[in-house]
Amino acid sequence: QARRPLRSCANSSPTTAMCDQAAGVELLNSGAFSEAESHLRFAIAQTAGEKNVHGLQNAEQFMWTRRLAESLIGQGKFEEATRCLKPAIKQLQIKYGPNDEDVLDCKYLLAESLFGEGKRHDADPIAQSILEGLHGNLKRGPDHFTTLKCRALCALYQKKQCKSIAKGLAQSTLEALESVLEQAETRVEAGGRKLMEPELLAAEKVRGFLAQVLDPEADGKAKDSRASSKSSTCVPDSEYAASDFGGSRCPSKA
């Protein structure tokens, strides 16, 4: 699908804006990051300057900024994603507190983005600091894909520090992932819902991280991939909150 140009906010009706925002979320969830980017930038432009009843900047803009960062990470545009995420985290944390699920999601994305920039020593403390919050958050928890990705990222960092610790963490994370996928299969057999595409993409990303710890050959392939194409550094990622495991949705916070 061809990338759509940015629209002028002045010439867009509210209905058109909502359709464009929905298109951005749909493309993001399908892993079409380049195509989603322009829609998400448009959504940010639409919410720029909006304030809530208390006169504070509307959190919706920062929610769209988070989704833009997802699309940028998916394209390997890590430095730009980092620049987007830092102010969004600051404002969301002021409004909702450090253990809010959207704050934790943003911090995970920041850790992944920094890791992609090669700033592993900056990324690891962030990832380590949010693990407990993700485990304890009622909308995330130990089986959520963001939690599993965070654990996998920590294992990948530990590979350079202590291989035995890294392999132990990677193996336990892989077992947790397999358990989640097995539960999903059981649910389908009982007539429940199937995993959505963003959930499957998130599982693929977890496997990709873990393979670099547990499979030496995979690490070499990952390095070759990064050298050949920026866009191949990240498996598609967008798994926020439309279900038990996640799925990106239009922001609802004010």
Image: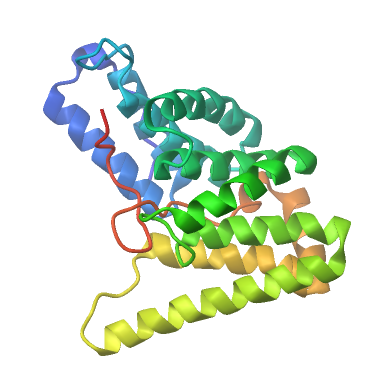
Query: Position of 178 compared to 24: left or right?
Result: right
The residue nearer to you, when weighing 5 against 58, is 58
In the rendered view, tell whether residue 73 sits above or below residue 79.
below
The residue nearer to you, when weighing 145 against 222, is 145
Query: Position of 236 compared to 100: left or right?
Result: right
Q: Residue at x 59, y 38 (%)?
A: 110
Q: Residue at x 39, y 82 (%)?
A: 183
Quadrant in the picture for the C terminus:
top left
What colour scheme was applied to this rendering of the protein? rainbow
In the rendered view, tell whether residue 217 sits above or below residue 109.
below
User: Can residue 217 be seen here?
Assistant: yes
The percent position of residue 83, horizontal first and vertical second, equals: 59, 25
The percent position of residue 89, horizontal first and vertical second, equals: 50, 30
**Quarter-of-image position of residue 4:** top left
In the rendered view, tell whether residue 55 sits above or below residue 191.
above
The percent position of residue 224, horizontal first and vertical second, equals: 79, 58
